[in-house]
Image: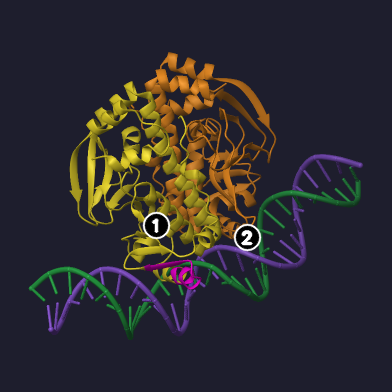
Chain colours: A yellow, B orange, C green, D purple
Amino acid sequence: MVDALLLKLGQHDRISDEERELLKRAFTRERAYSADRDIVSAGARPSVCTTLLDGFAARYKMLASGKRQITAILVPGDIIDLNGFLCKTMDQGVVALTACRVAIADHDSIGRITDTAPHLTRLLWLDTLIDAAIHREWLVAMGRRRKSAQLAHFICEIHMRLGIIEQTDGHRFHLPLSQAELADVLGISVVHFNRVLQELRQQGLITWSNHTVEIRDAHRLRQTAEFDPTYLSLQFEPR
Amino acid sequence: MVDALLLKLGQHDRISDEERELLKRAFTRERAYSADRDIVSAGARPSVCTTLLDGFAARYKMLASGKRQITAILVPGDIIDLNGFLCKTMDQGVVALTACRVAIADHDSIGRITDTAPHLTRLLWLDTLIDAAIHREWLVAMGRRRKSAQLAHFICEIHMRLGIIEQTDGHRFHLPLSQAELADVLGISVVHFNRVLQELRQQGLITWSNHTVEIRDAHRLRQTAEFDPTYLSLQFEPR
DNA sequence: CCCGCGCACTTACATATGTTAGAGTTGCCG
DNA sequence: CGGCAACTCTAACATATGTAAGTGCGCGGG
């Protein structure tokens, strides 16, 4: 059930059979959400952790003006609210962008892991550190890159993250998000998102239609994005 | 030596005497950096963790264009490169913005804590989760707030964080950063930073001179910032 | 004491991005 | 199969933000 999670954690370091078992036994229940439903709401005090099995979700925050900023895109294998285990109160909500299936673990089970399985605990901690590194990369892109470079960077990142969980087909991948949702990721208007998208298309860097993205010139795309995947900690080494 | 760190961690949950001792014994060595020196550089593979005792530092990334984005402001009590313990390679550098004093702990000592002191480990983990929550809040401010609101939000946050380590004087605090540095925080030009600053001044929300900020109307400042400190996890409860 | 340098601040103009409105497209459902 | 609804894409204009250039102030070193 938690295959994608294991696939992802296994990128960073060896996971023993016992550790695999611990995780599998923690994430027992399963649940489905339809698109546009909150999986966790801002301000909630969850008593469980949830990992995405299938579909796309987004961490987000609404402002009084009605504007929305998406602060993270979650793909299968991502833990949605591991921060809730220690932060107690969710600072932001997570919404299903497509139909989603999730697996659920009680905080008690996670707590038992932190009490008895230090190495697995470090891997879970690492997972949240990578989330933070992604946030930092987004901050850089948002604050100091040209918007076309920000989009290029986002495409490189998602392509790589989907690759880990074997959801890419070479340079092509499925990204079932609307332009309005992607505009909320980049922090720009839908109109401007479309302008920026045309720019990447016109430069022959990508094609994008029917929610399928194809990278046509990976080298130049990475170059405009100044993409360096170090922040994803994909090196396999003892942790 | 690590008083500020203990003060900060102690906001979230009770710390036992043994845990205090463990931390004190981990952070043995001390070191000083002058302003504008890197404390850790991007791409480094540190074998130690460092916590700020005194001064202000910033996590940052440089782009090929020469632009800089600051992704975090570090104040005394913050751990500078706890992520390096598990990520191994630093995704971004940390620079001393003023003269800084730091305390240093070997990764081995931190590793021993994670192997033997689960509760203290959770508190350290929590600290990195709060870093991530701050990043998310900055993403929202950067992407979707008016720039004056972004600055207002930053002031509210820093005031609160300095309050925890007892570096505020009521509604006044010392913030020895130049406008160029603050512009790199907000992701705007120096000129525009100055415009935005004038705006907050003119609205009577703050005064700001000689690197001293005074909040004149806390209520309206929070209101324009839509500031809600939930994301800092300042609630005292078992973790 | 004065000079020079860094920093805060300003102006004028250029560019990027947002807003509003609407036309074309696609896909789903009755 | 027709029609609604959501989405993509474009245009025209308004606003926010960046760039280049320069003034003035305050502080530390000679």
Residue A152's disc number? none
Residue at mark 2: chain = B
Counting from the top left corner in percent of width and height, residue A93 is at: 31, 48
Q: Which residues are magenta?
A: A197-208
Q: Is residue C27 left or right of residue B63?
A: left
Report the residue marked by disc 1.
Answer: A170
Q: Secondary structure at mark 2?
A: helix
Identity of the amino acid at label 1? Gly
Based on the picture, tell me whether residue A201 belongs to the magenta stretch. yes
Crowding at label 1, few (<14), some or many (≥20) Cα neighbours within 10 Å? few
The reply to whether callout 2 and callout 1 are in contact (CB within 8 Å) is no
Quadrant (top left, top right, bottom left, bottom right) of the N terminus of chain B: top right
Residue at the image point whose x is 48% and y is 53% from the top: B150
Residue B191's disc number? 2
Q: Is residue A1 left or right of residue A84?
A: left
Counting from the top left corner in percent of width and height, residue B3 is at: 53, 23
Counting from the top left corner in percent of width and height, residue A231 is at: 49, 44
For this rendering, which residue is in front, B1 or B108?
Answer: B108
Based on the picture, tell me whether residue A209 belongs to the magenta stretch. no
Residue at the image point whose x is 56% and y is 44% from the top: B214
